[in-house]
């Protein structure tokens, strides 16, 4: 599972990070203490944080959507009719949003 903290800027190093317990200089995100003295000038290689570039469009679960397309069969007329009637754009529009679009 992942966590998105909206509006949070990517920290440049462990000292700037909200995941660090100040008292013990312990990374609460991975359950370990940074050992390298360079963590004050950079993020360590094992840092689990990932940057989500902004602006970005609405992010959906592509794998789930593809799975639904693959499961479509002639026996499932409601899905097939939906697809034919509305086309792929509307099917994608109806896909559940994982992360809202940002401007």
Image: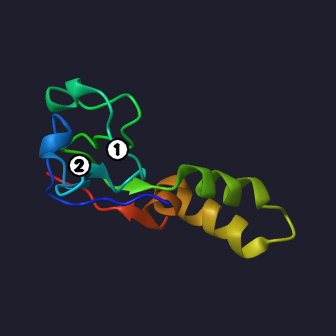
Q: Is disc 2 surrounded by few (<14), some (14 to 19) or many (20+) residues within 10 Å?
A: some
**Residue 11: x %, y % from top left:** 16, 41
Check residue 25 in the rendering and tell me which mark sits there, or answer none. Answer: 2
Between the residue at mark 1 and the residue at mark 2, the CA separation in whole angstroms equals 6 Å
**Residue 78 has which mark?**
none
Q: Is residue 103 above or below residue 13?
A: below
**Badge 1 vs badge 2, beta-carbon distance below 8 Å:** yes
Which quadrant of the figure has residue 36?
Answer: top left
Residue 33 image position (x, y, % from top left): 34, 44
**Up-down relation of residue 19 to residue 86 (above or below):** above
**What residue is shown with label 1?**
33
Secondary element at tag 1: loop
Q: Nearer the viewer, residue 17 or 3?
A: 17
Q: Nearer the viewer, residue 98 or 85?
A: 98
* Residue at the farthest front position: 24
Residue drawn at point x = 22 percent, y = 30 percent: 39
Where is residue 14? Give x, y as percent.
21, 40
Q: Relative to 82, is 18 above or below?
A: above
Residue at point 55%, 57% (across, down): 87
Q: Nearer the viewer, residue 52 or 67?
A: 52
């Amino acid at each position: 599972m992942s966590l998105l903290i909206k509006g949070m800027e990517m920290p440049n190093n462990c000292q700037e990070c909200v995941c660090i317990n100040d008292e013990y200089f312990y990374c609460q995100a991975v359950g370990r203490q940074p050992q390298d003295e360079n963590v004050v000038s950079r993020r360590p290689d094992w840092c689990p944080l990932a940057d989500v570039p902004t602006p970005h469009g609405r992010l959906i679960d592509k794998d789930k959507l593809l799975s639904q397309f693959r499961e479509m069969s002639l026996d499932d007329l409601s899905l097939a009719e939906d697809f034919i009637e509305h086309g792929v754009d509307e099917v994608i529009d109806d896909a559940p949003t994982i992360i809202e679009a940002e401007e």
